[in-house]
């Protein structure tokens, strides 16, 4: 992700109308600025298209090595932009801050995104996006585990989200898609939720763009390492990678990682988590439409019904939890 208002190549300074985040056990209320809405817009639209990009990439590229290479590339590009625009000092962090960024990077990118990439070798991109829409429900449950009492609407929204999740697994139970792929996406949503929640509770780098760079580099290296452990390098022939997979990979590097992930990392330190989580009910709409139009993915009854239930539950969670 990038600065929420502009492209990272032209500006990487945090907006002046917000103050740097200071992790604390009881974070102060955060004002919703125009910059926050701009960042949300980036996450809404761009991340909705990344499911299609991932699906095209894994047609001819190994899942974890492709994910690792794009995150490391995007992280290094962002670090270079920060050093160029703000000076190398902007990248300085202490050990605790680096460890925190590394942990969040592994949870979000290896656990969250990496498992989705693997799952999309057997699960349609639209279904993956709908499964991921349950993230806000997990966020409410994770917050409850740390003593933050959910609202009644939040509880009802969680129950609706889980009911929708059950309906969305029907294609896997019926054999239309691999149930293992569905399970991978569900696990990914839980790890992503834990990583998102943790980022506002541990000592992250003061510069959110530096934090994003370290998260992508460490998370990308973790993805690549797992790819090597899985033996994805054996038989890998770059000449056999299709042009459309390369184009999709480049799109994911620039838009999905450098711009959109940086915007998400910035939002986690600047906006209420319940508001940030609203991307989860916008992304599926974009992803399902693109999957159906570009890849011809079928919209089965369980996907339509389950997706509607999940989106309804998420809307309820966001409308009631945002005040908290």
Image (cartoon, rainbow, N blue to C red):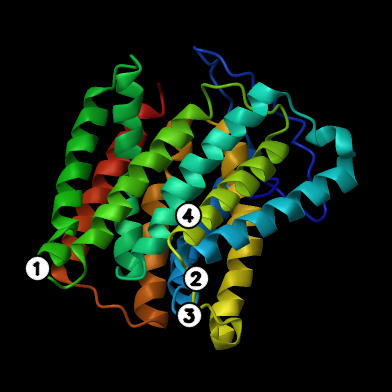
Q: Are marks 2 and 4 in contact (CB under 8 Å)?
A: no
> In terms of secondary structure, where does tag 4 sit?
helix
Please state the horizontal and vertical placement of residue 7, each as a whole percent of the image: 74, 55
**Quadrant location of the C terminus in the rendered image:** top left
Q: From the viewer's perspective, is 250 left or right of 229?
A: right
Q: Which residue is located at x 77 percent, y 47 percent? A: 79
Residue carrying label 4:
226
Q: Position of residue 207 (x, y in %)?
A: 73, 32
Residue 298, quarter of picture: bottom left
Q: Residues within 10 Å of mark 1 (few under 14, many from 20)?
A: few
- Which element carries disc 3, helix, strand or loop? loop
Alpha carbons under labels 4 and 1: distance apart: 30 Å
Q: Distance from label 3 to label 1 (Cα)?
A: 27 Å
Say how many tags the image has: 4
Q: Which residue is mark 2?
A: 53
Image point 73% across, 24% down: which residue?
94
Q: Is residue 273 left or right of residue 207?
A: left
Query: Whole-percent x and y of residue 30?
Result: 57, 23
Mark 4 surroundings within 10 Å by alpha-carbon count, few (fewer than 14), some (14 through 19), many (20 or more) = some
Is 33 left, or right, of 185 in this rendering? right
Specify the label residue 60 is tagged with.
3
Mark 1, secondary structure of its residue:
loop
Whether residue 10 is visible, yes or no, is: yes
Q: Is residue 269 left or right of residue 54?
A: right
Task: Give the residue displayed 32% in from the left and 54% down from the top.
Answer: 185
């Amino acid at each position: 992700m990038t600065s929420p208002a502009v492209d990272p190549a032209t500006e990487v300074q945090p907006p002046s109308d917000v103050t740097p985040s200071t992790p604390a056990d009881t974070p102060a209320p955060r004002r919703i600025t125009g910059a926050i809405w701009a960042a949300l817009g980036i996450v809404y639209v761009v991340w909705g298209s990344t499911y299609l990009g991932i699906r095209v990439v894994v047609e001819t590229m190994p899942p974890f090595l492709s994910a690792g290479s794009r995150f490391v590339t995007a992280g290094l590009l962002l670090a270079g932009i920060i050093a160029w625009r703000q000076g190398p000092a902007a990248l300085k962090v202490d050990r605790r801050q680096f460890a925190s960024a590394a942990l969040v990077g592994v949870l979000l990118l290896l656990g969250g995104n990496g498992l989705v990439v693997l799952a999309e070798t057997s699960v349609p991109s639209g279904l993956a996006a709908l499964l991921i829409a349950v993230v806000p429900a997990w966020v409410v449950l994770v917050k409850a585990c740390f003593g933050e009492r959910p609202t009644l609407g939040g509880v009802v929204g969680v129950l609706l989200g889980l009911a929708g999740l059950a309906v969305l697994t029907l294609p896997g139970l019926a054999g239309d898609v691999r149930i293992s792929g569905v399970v991978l996406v569900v696990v990914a949503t839980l790890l992503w939720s834990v990583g998102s929640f943790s980022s506002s509770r541990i000592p992250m780098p003061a510069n959110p763009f530096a934090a994003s760079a370290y998260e992508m580099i460490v998370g990308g290296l973790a993805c690549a390492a797992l790819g090597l452990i899985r033996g994805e390098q054996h038989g890998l022939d770059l000449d056999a990678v299709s042009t459309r997979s390369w184009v999709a990979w480049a799109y994911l590097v620039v838009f999905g990682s450098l711009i959109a992930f940086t915007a998400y990392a910035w939002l986690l330190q600047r906006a209420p988590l319940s508001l940030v989580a609203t991307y989860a009910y916008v992304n599926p709409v974009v992803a399902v439409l693109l999957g159906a139009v570009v890849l011809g993915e079928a919209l089965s009854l369980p996907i339509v019904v389950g997706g509607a239930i999940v989106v309804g539950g998420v809307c309820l969670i966001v409308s009631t939890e945002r005040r908290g």
